[in-house]
Image (cartoon, rainbow, N blue to C red):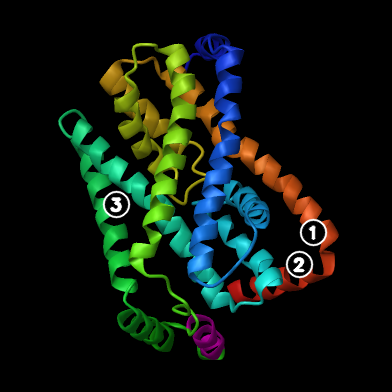
Amino acid sequence: MDIAKLKESLQNIPLSLLLLSLSLSLPNVIIRSKEWQLILREQNINLSLLRVTKIFLIGFFYGVITPSYVGQLMRIPYLKTDTKEPLGKLFVNIQIEILVHNASLYLMIIAGAFLVINSIPNLAYLSFFFIAIISLIAFYFVNQTRGEKTLQLLINYLAPKKIRTILKQFVCTFYTDFPKIKKLLIPAFLAFITWIIVFTQEYLLAYSLNPALPYLAFLFLFPIANAAGFLPITFAGLGTRELTSILLFTTLFNMPKEDVFIFTLLGFFVTDIFIGLVGFLCTIHENHTNKDRIAKEIKDFQALLK
């Protein structure tokens, strides 16, 4: 890409729109935390919204600096210090929250895939395949009998003998207080609102470079690029999301690749890095105020991962 054009694109984004986009991060975090709090309650874990928000921000910080946002699992040791719930139950809670949160994103991806099926068919088919795999895995393991039997078989046949007992103790609580699907509808609706906010933040930056870019089309196309960031290649999908965005918006709207790169990169700062920095500050504060308890839970959690 042309460095001079990148600089020009960056200068063409008004500070007012950048600040407006940034300001939407606060309601987004609050709604996302409320979504998670409702799921926690369905599993008989009662924490205040303030506490849930702080733990979410800590997990978000770790997610931003790891591939596929896998660092979000670092919410577990912090939850453990407050709840004393078994690790298996807390692990599943995080997986449920992530799945519920991403369910509406997957629906948006399907809509976007239909929009690009004629112009970029391979990307559309890849999107359909990705959603199908996720859906099948979720459908399979949501059934307790089927899920427990499969997990036990995997442990017996694949896990080394010396850690089989530990793993069985870990997975035996996976389905403890497992929530009913219908109870997840409100959290799923809140998740949909958070995605609308996130993509509106991105759109404000894209709009400043291309006012002709249709909002509704953007809402269904950018989720495809966002999902590309879930690939475990770089931390928080940096690069894969930008590449997919360039493919989408240069092909469909003839946007200069420099413009696409700038608005996606700035969008990553607004929707990820900024919140991650707040999470980093929460992590420092939490580790300072609850140093001994947190250190023990993190050590135990790391030992389990090893």
Q: Which residue is mark 3?
A: 130
Residue under the point 34% across and 11% down: 212
Residue 306 drawn above or below residue 37: below
**Mark 2 or 3: the one toward you:** 2
Q: Which residue is mark 1?
A: 287
Part of the protein shown in magenta: 163-171
Give the quadrant of residue 18: top right
Residue under the point 58% across and 35% down: 25
Q: Nearer the viewer, residue 274 or 27?
A: 27
Q: Inspect this view and state whether residue 225 appears.
A: yes
Q: Which residue is mark 2?
A: 294
Which residue of the protein is positioned furthest toward the left in this rendering? 118
Image position, residue 256 (x, y; %)? 39, 14
Q: Earlier along the polypeptide chain: callout 2 or callout 3?
A: 3
Image position, residue 19 (x, y; %)? 61, 21
Relative placement, left or right, of 48 versus 44 is: right
Whether tag 2 and tag 1 are in contact, CB under 8 A, the answer is yes
Cα distance between the residues tagged 2 and 3:
36 Å
Relative placement, left or right, of 83 versus 28 is: right
Q: Check disc 2 and give the amino acid type.
A: Ile
Image position, residue 267 (x, y; %)? 52, 29
Within 10 Å of disc 2 (Cα), the crowding (few <14, some 14-19, many 20+) is: many
Q: How many marks?
A: 3
Q: Nearer the viewer, residue 295 or 286?
A: 286
